[in-house]
Each structure stands twice: as structure tokens, then as C-alpha cells.
Image: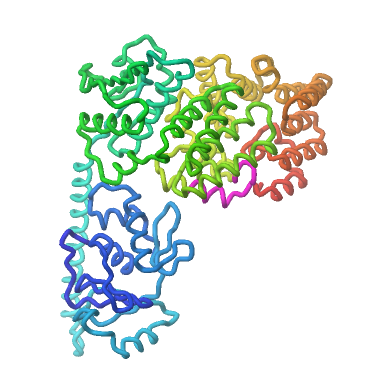
Amino acid sequence: MFGDAFMTPRNSPAFLFDDVRVEPATFQAFKAGNVIQLEPKALKLLLFLIENRGRLIEKEEILDTIWNGTHVTENALAREIGKLRKTLGDDPKAARYIETVHTRGYRFIAEVTLGNSGSSYAREAVSTEVGKDREDTNSETGPPAISPAMPAWPSKTLSTHSMWLALALIGVLGLSILTGIKLWKRGHKTAVASANPAMTSVAVLPFKSSGSSEGDEYLGVEIADALTARLATIKRLSIRPMATVLHYANSSQNPTAIGSLLKVDYILHGEIDKSKQQVTAHLIRVRDGAQLLAENYDEKLNDIFQLEDSLCARVLSNLMVTVQSEEIQRFRRHYTENQQAYEAFLKGHFFMAKATKEDLNKSIDYFRQAIDLDPEYAMAYAGLSDSYMRLGRFGIGPAEFVPKSRAAVMKALELDETVPYAHSMLGRIAFQYDWDFPRAEHEYARARELQPTLVHAWYAAYLMTLNRVPEAEVEYRKFEEFLPFLADIGMAQYFYLTRQYDRAVDVLNGKLKANPAFPAAHEALGRVYEQQGRSQQAIEEFQKAINLSVGNYGVGALGHIYAALGRKDEARNAIRKLDQRSRLSYVSPYEKAVIYAGLGEKDETLKYLQKAFDERSLAGPMLRFDPRLNDLRADPRFQEFMRRVGVTP
């Protein structure tokens, strides 16, 4: 709608709402009689919202119209909306003018009336007649539509021949306009496509360390991870996640070969000599092994911020990537300016990703240390929340770790509402432990709004719980493609719950080939085999899970299949083993529930389902879809339980 010149007819009416007057003809806006200082882009945006008032305008439509093919992010739109709200005196939490529809777009909701065009409002006050007109137009029919003036029919009746001729001319004119619009759209799409160059893919390998003291093993991995996170904010770049890169980190192959395996255009790697406080970085083009960057940096390692800023700038320069100003601001953003706090955060992040309870406790200590050094470090609070949440993998009950995780993430958002990591964690807590599905939806949407590329396995589980199965599949696939080597069974779990057993077997066998000592995958494979009627193979997989996890996985699943096979004594023995283990660590009552379901004891099954819900260890997708509960689903008591917990049968 708006070109660069933003041409507007000189007789266009002014728009009036509250004490604001916007004049398209003079391209000015006024509040309480004073000129509002708005940049041209913001004023264009305001006019577009007003002209489309009452209608939800999708973000993509606004970006296409106002930025006219220029490639900018949704953050640029959010900033302009924020400027408008501040200037107009609007409150996003109780909007009077511009309403936000999360993840979708915006709607102008103020009552708008039309005023006379002409001389500027700054020189000529609005007459009392205009005020009267405003009152008269405030009716149930809503604000008047804004449309081009149409020529009136002559007062004299047209002859039949003249009428048909006029209609034919109108038809030809309409066809010409439609054809023109189609051609314009086709040309516009072509122009946008040609202006959108191909993505450049990059992987950052962990920097190798030398001259480092004990306890510095985190440095090379975490610097690479930090560079990965920064470069991932650039739209023109496709950055491989660190979890994928780490799969090849200890390979004896050279970086170019690793780049080929990762299917990237460029590979960034380097060395850190802490004794000399020196960093060397190499940027290699994978297709021919050409080295684009080989520099020794003089920045001291006690200024990691400067090191990361400098290295990112050199990489972008060598890749000749055009970067938008808002992207520069994002990748140069520091959530803390305290060097020691940042190093503690890096250590916390490093140990959080490891597989042992000892390392997880180390990560909690480091995140706390970061917070002690900088009490306003929002990202450290978000990391602390995540570490607390992971304690559930090690036999600690939700009642112990959820309150701590919640307190940390709420503090993170109190300090900085724009941390997507924190919104994602709060969404998980709302879904998994509060069963507050509207709040979970809100938090996940906000996380995506702040970071559109965010992928989250827990969001997929949330969608499954609400029976939004096609959407869940999309999210599971995104997560699997983004982190193919992660020890995660989300995609296989999706196939299991949707009865796609052969596909589940394929995924799980791939996971176990990469990591044979993965107890959760062995248990999941056993559950799939059970549904396929491969009972003996299922029992073998459950036994592997039990042995590998020292009883943390597989006991309930083994008890269920024994019950289903009529081996009741062995099933009840599994219940006794769960009781014994619960004296040492937390055991979800769901483990007993599935065994009692196999035994056909519905009262006991419902009892332990309720207990699992009360203790917040009941998984929503399993409750809705687990085939081991199928014999219970027609029971009115089970259906009432489902309704009570918010999962409609």
C-alpha cells in the first residue's frame, strides 16, 4: 500500500480518536493539539493500522506493506509498535489503541471518526462541529469505512443499452485491475525472492585448549557454544546446534571432513592457549578447504566479551553477510557485563549438559555463583531453573525441585521479560506441573515471539496432551532435525502414542546404535515391541533398561507386560520392587498404575493415576494415549478423572 514516497491524496480525511488527530494529507500527527514527533516508518505503520482498524492484521502482512520487501525481523515491528504506544500513551497490558494478538499480529481497536482535511491541525483548531460529528458517528454501526470516492449515477435513468454497455466497461475495467494485481504480486514475489539470497550454513567446533589448568575443560566448548548462539541470531546464517557438533568433536577427522559430514558451507574452529592468553581461529570453506580466516587474537581471555564480539565480526566480514542493525544489537547483547559472572554461567551451562547427578549439582553451584556475582543476571536465573528441573532424572520428586525451578525462572522474568529461555521454562512448569494449559500456551507463544527459531520438545508434549496431534508431529520433527544426536526419545514416543510402531522401532534402533547404554530408549523399545506382540523381545529390552539404570527405568513396564501375559506373581513382585526403590528415591505412582491396569484392577489403577497427578508426575501425553490404559478408557470414572485434570476424553 505504501511506497517509498508515501503519496497521499491532498483531500484525504483526518483520523480522530481521543485527543489524537492523524492527517494523511500532511503526513503529520497531533496529540492534544501538539505535533507528535514520529519517524516516517512509525507514522506509516500508524496510518496502516488505522485504515485497517477492527481487523487482526498478521505480522507478515504488516512487514510486507510497511517495509516493502526489505528483510527485517519481527523485532523491528515490535519496536515500532512500542514507540507508537509510548507516544500515544497506550498500555500494552490494557490496550486502548493497539491490541497485540500473541504470535499473530496487531489490531487497532480505538473508535475512529473522520475530520476535515486541509490546513494543519497545528495552525487550525478542530471546530465544535467536528466534535459534534464525532459524537454522532459513535454508534452501533461502528466507524465509517474508508474507501475511494465513487462517482454517482446520473439522476436520469439509463437506457437498457447504455446500462449493458456500462456494465461491460466495468467488467473489462475490473478484469484489467485484477490482472494488474496478479502481475504486480507475481513481480513482487519474484523481486522478494531475488532479494533473499541463499542461506549460508556454518558449524562452530569446540576450540581445543592447551596450557589450561585443571577445571578449564569447559572453556573451549563454551566459547564455541557462545559463538554458535550469537551467530544464530543472524537470519542469513544457518548454524548447526552445539549438541549436533559435539557428536563429531572427538573425531580424528580434519575440520573440513567434519564440515562435510555436518553438511555445512563453512566450519569455524580454533585453539586456546591459556598460558599465553592467546586464541587462534580458522574459518574454512568446506567445498575446497580454502582458509578464509587464520588470525591470532590479542584480546586477553579475561575479556571474553571482547573476544566473542571481535571474532563474530571477523567471521561475518569474511562471509560477506549483510546484517541488519537489529541483528547486530542482538548478537552483541550481553546479559551481564560482569566477566566473572559470565565465566561462572559458562561453567554452569557446561556441566548442566552432562549426564551425571554430580555434574548437575556442579551446574547449580556455578549458576548460583554467577547470580552472587551479578544479582541482576536474568539468564543465570533461567539456567538455574533449568538445572533444578533436570533433577527429576535422578530420583528427586517434583515437590522438591519444582518450587526452586519456579522461583528462579520468575526472578529471571522479573529482571528481564525478554529472555525467551525463561518463558520456555515457565511454559514447561505451567504445562507439566501446574496443568495450567492457557498459561503454558501463553508462555510458549511469548518464547517463540522473542525467538522464532526456538525449538522445544516440551512444547510438542504439550500439544499432544491437548490432542493437537498434527502440530505436535511438526514440533517433534523440528526438534529431531535440530538435535539428531541428542539422547531424546520424543519422536519415537510420538510414533508409539500414535500407533506407528514400525517407525518407532526405526527411530529407537538409530538412537541405540549411537548410544547402546541409553536406558530410556531400551524401555521405549520394549513398550513398542509389546504392542507389536513381540513379548520376549520386549522383556529383554526392559531388563536392559533396568540393568543400565540400576532400576530407575523399566520396572513398571516389565511389571505391566508380566501382568498382561498372566504372570501375576511376577507382576506383583515388580510392584514390591517399586516400593523398595521408593524408599531410596522418588518413584512416580504412574509406574504402579500401569501394572494394575495390566492386572485388570481398575480401582487401584485410578487410585495411582490420581496419586501421580497429585504429585505432579503424571505425563499428559501418556494419560491421553498410552495403549496400556486402553481397557480403562470406557470407564466413566476414568473419563471423569480426565475431565477433572483438564484433558478432555
Residue toward you, 629 or 26: 26
Q: Look at the image and name its color scheme.
A: rainbow
Quarter that holds the N terminus = bottom left
Query: Quick check: can you spot residue 300?
Result: yes
* Residue closest to the eye, 281 or 638: 281
The x and y percentages for residue 308 are 33, 31
Image coordinates of residue 152 in percent, x first then y, are 21, 83
Q: Answer whether residue 473 is visible to the viewer in this image.
A: no
Q: Determine if the magenta segment contains residue 413.
A: no
Residue 285 position by quadrant: top left
Q: Position of residue 95 (x, y in %)?
A: 45, 66
**Residue at image location 37% in from the left, 25% down from the top:** 224
Residue 569 horizontal side relative to residue 211, left or right: right
Given residues 132 and 125, the one toward you in this image is: 125
Whether 440 is among the magenta residues is yes
Residue at 26%, 67% in the rendered image: 37
Name the spot of residue 489 as percent of width and height, x first.
55, 27
Q: Which residues are magenta?
A: 430-445
Q: From what the image shows, is residue 643 above or below residue 222? A: below
Q: Quadrant of residue 154?
A: bottom left
Report the number of numbered marks: 0
Question: Quick one: which residue is furthest to the top in this view?
Answer: 252
Q: Measured along the vertical axis of the image, is residue 606 above or below residue 592?
A: below
Which residue lies at the image location 56% right of the left edge and 32% below the top edge?
A: 387
Residue sitting nearer the eye, 320 or 526 = 320
Name the main secondary structure of what is drawn in magenta.
Answer: helix
